[in-house]
Image: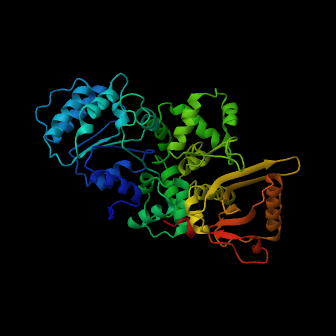
Amino acid sequence: MAYSKSIVGRHEEQDILSACVSTPKAEFIAVYGRRRVGKTYLIKQHFKNKFDFYTSGIYKISNEDQLENFRQQLLVYGLSEVPKLKNWFEAFAALRRLLEGKRKSKRIVFIDELPWHDAPRSNYLRALESFWNMWAADQQGLKLIVCGSSATWMTNTLLGDKGGLHNRVTRRIKLHPFTLAETETYLKRNGFLWNRFLVLQCYMAVGGTPYYLSMLQPDQSVDQNIDRLFFAEDAELKNEYSFLFRSLFNDATGYRRVVETLAQTMKGMTREELVNTLKISDNGQLTKILDNLCSCDFIRKYSPFGKKNKGTLYQLTDLYALFYLRFVNNYHGGNPNAWSGMNAGVRNAWLGYAFEQVCLGHILQIRKSLGISVIANDVSSWYCKTEEQTAQIDLILDRADNIINLCEMKFCSHSFEITKQYAEHLRERIGFFADITRTRKALHLTMVTTFGVKKSKHSSIVQNEVTMDDLFAG
């Protein structure tokens, strides 16, 4: 199908929206994802702002003011003589009157930031339930699109409702941050002349969140942009971190504690380790926090190799949060060039770690490069410590065709050279993995690097290569 030229990527999401509009039945569409990921932009651009009614919740205002804002939008969209609304049942009754006066074949309603309407004791959800179940669900061609950044509300309150809205949402769209390919397209459209190596470095600091990318300036280098956004006086992304959690989660403090604890370790932590470190109860609240952080793409949940049902690890993977907590959280100002003047060793260590996280966010592209997209495979990692040896492999692809790809990820500004010493280290680690796991599958060392592996007498240890360009594949 033809996609909107104003939208970068999001083809699957546009397909869903188009399919919903083309059906004759009523549709209740929920779009959710982390703050700043482009939910509102996607919906407005896809429908070219042609709505029969549009409104948005407003952050941290009273229920009375939310109702007044809703009333004003009813007037804007053509409903005359709307008296002051006393509650949300009256508000949705007025919306019904507005829509009954519109064309019957296709009516599109967009309610943005839905969770912010739901003040305590407002009965907002029950009023929405009444509107949908008692009228809207039976209206042919009516499309109700709701959107929200508050993960706990969208996933637990709306999508997880046990009352009259249970299973009423007909389509769900979870919007993720941009991939490297989408980020490259976005930057090119906005006049950036950066090569892929520069795009990658920028991505490792701000991630693929479109709003953060929109703050970049094409006449500045990557380092200059990072300095301006994070370290300058009144830097725009310096205060974003705390507001991000307040807007996404009801218990912002609890979520931040989990994220900031996970930021302290590269390999991730088990649930038991989190409980012991945070000194909290192992209960349903922790389950909700972990599930919602996964849902918002802050953390990933994965099983160690060979342990599908136990030892689950949680790892912080959100690139913005990782960069912020490593370099900005304890920064007290005074050096607007903190990043560009950073010690080379500190920077290189960070870039190496951040590159690993980028790779973990682009496993589909790695599988495509290896030609195993259609082969069933499990994604895991491995860590083992004995009295004699400690080893870790951050990405393992356990394939159904009796091959295991042991992925080694290395960030480098040139072709990566495997020295004699490093080759011996790799052979020792592969042997240790084979001995401990007792696998009978063939073990393929797979190097994931920026510019490939330099051909040398020691490079033959590598069976497969994935480069930065492969990670940029669509």
User: Is 131 above or below relative to 356?
Assistant: above
Is residue 327 toward the left or the right of residue 384 in the image?
A: left
Residue located at (17% from left, 42% from top): 77
141, 218: nearer the viewer: 141
Residue 323: x and y in percent read: 58, 50
Residue 407 in view, yes or no: yes
Instruction: Quadrant for residue 417, please give it.
Output: bottom right
Residue 445 image position (x, y, % from top left): 72, 65
Residue 27 in percent (x, y) is at 30, 44
Seen as rendered, the residue at the extreme left is 81
Residue 114 appears left or right of 300: left
Position of 211 relative to 414 (above/below): above
Give the residue drawn at x 51%, y 53%. 206
Nearer-the-camera pick, 417 or 179: 179
> Tag count in the figure?
0
Res 343 seen here = no
